[in-house]
Image (cartoon, helix red, strand yellow):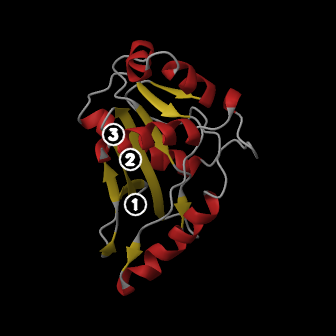
Amino acid sequence: MIRFGLWVFTIACVLAQVGAAGGVVPGDRSYADPDAYAVYSAVIPSEWAVTAAHAKNLVIARETTGYKICLKPDNNTAEIIGPAIENYEAQNRESWMLEPKIETHIPFKLLNSSEVKEAFENSGWEGFYRNYPDSGGIIELSAVGFNSDKTIAVIYVGHSCGMLCGGGSFHVLEKKNGNWTPLKWNGLSCSWVS
């Protein structure tokens, strides 16, 4: 029963988070920050759809999905990560509309809410995969939180891939020599999987 509930919750989140009919979210805004797209480009290759599902064509929800932050850095790393967490919370008060600026070796399609709804309308995940084969499901991205000099980033990335198939987690990255890499830090984090 819990697993069925998680599946229903996952589908509901996907449909709710990708916005209202027609792909328009109240306060609809284009997300144009090039630093955010560099972070997306760094994180996506390590995500489930790429590493486990071996997707050949990624599907990404066009509207950003901001989840309640659950990162709790310890006293030694709070000063480093704290400003990016605060910025994450501010950036994710509203949804942003992603642009096709993510650099990845795998082709991708940004789907607005009406396209997601249409893909699921008649036969759920079977219909989705009929329309988007080899996609590994739907990836959802938050807006990116940065510290003031944009050397630390906080992002949520999730995926939904079928009944009892999905997950999500927060990532903390550091920009070194022009590249975004995972930051080693101490404290508590969280993730989910079904």
Tag 3: amino acid? Phe
Tag 2: amino acid? Val
Q: Nearer the viewer, residue 38 or 60?
A: 60
Q: Are marks 2 and 1 in contact (CB under 8 Å)?
A: yes
Classify mark 3: residues with Cα within 10 Å, few (<14), some (14-19) or many (20+): few
Mark 3, secondary structure of its residue: helix
On the image, the x and y values in percent for residue 164 come to: 30, 37
Mark 1, secondary structure of its residue: strand
Q: CA distance from mark 2 to mark 3?
A: 29 Å
Furthest-left residue in this view: 52
Which mark is in front, 1 or 3? Answer: 3
- Would residue 176 be seen by someone viewing this image from the given angle? no
> In the rendered image, which quarter contains the N terminus?
top left
Mark 2, secondary structure of its residue: helix
Q: Is residue 166 above or below residue 149?
A: above
Which residue is under mark 2? 43
- Would residue 144 be seen by someone viewing this image from the given angle? yes
Which residue is under mark 1? 173
Tag 1: amino acid? Leu
